[in-house]
Amino acid sequence: MKEELFNQYTQKVMSTFGLSKEELFRKTKKRHIVDARQMLWYVCNRRPMRVIQIQEYMSNNGYSTAHSVILHGINVMSEKIEDDQDYADIYSILCT
């Protein structure tokens, strides 16, 4: 059930950020891709989805990452949503 939700959020994030699945799950530090990934983690975490589940679903899509990296990304996105109306708007779009 949670994996299906993760996949739905993945599709919404890809559409909103204009990324392909390959781009979203590629190991890169390009800001727009990192932002999209962190937004995905944040939205899933707010659902609530456990970080270990997010980590597993990311790994299933070819993107292995540490638990602490996901937590950091969630915290960064939380601050961005609080401080930047554009990110808050994107979050609202993804939650509808």
Image (tube, grey):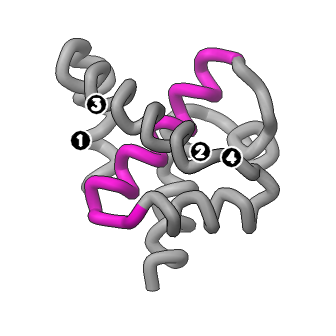
73 in the magenta segment:
no
The residue to which callout 2 is attached is 14
The residue at the point 45 percent across, 32 percent down is 72
CA distance for labels 2 and 4? 19 Å
The residue at the point 36 percent across, 50 percent down is 43
Which numbered disc, 3 or 1, marks the residue that appears first in the sequence? Answer: 3
CA distance for labels 2 and 3? 19 Å
Which numbered disc, 2 or 3, marks the residue that appears first in the sequence? Answer: 2
Which numbered disc, 4 or 1, marks the residue that appears first in the sequence? Answer: 4
Tags 2 and 3 in contact by the CB under 8 Å rule?
no
The residue to which callout 1 is attached is 92
Magenta stretch in the rendered image: 30-50
From the viewer's side, name the closer residue of 7 and 57: 57
The residue to which callout 3 is attached is 78
The residue at the point 72 percent across, 60 percent down is 59
The residue to which callout 4 is attached is 65
What element does badge 3 sit on?
helix
Residue 18: horizontal and vertical position, in percent?
61, 34
Q: Quadrant of residue 33?
A: top right
From the viewer's side, name the closer residue of 26 and 65: 65
Which amino acid type is marked by label 4?
Thr
Which numbered disc, 3 or 4, marks the residue that appears first in the sequence? Answer: 4
Residue 71: horizontal and vertical position, in percent?
43, 41
Which numbered disc, 2 or 4, marks the residue that appears first in the sequence? Answer: 2
Tags 3 and 4 in contact by the CB under 8 Å rule?
no
Is 19 positioned to the left or the right of 55 in the image?
right
From the viewer's side, name the closer residue of 96 and 35: 35
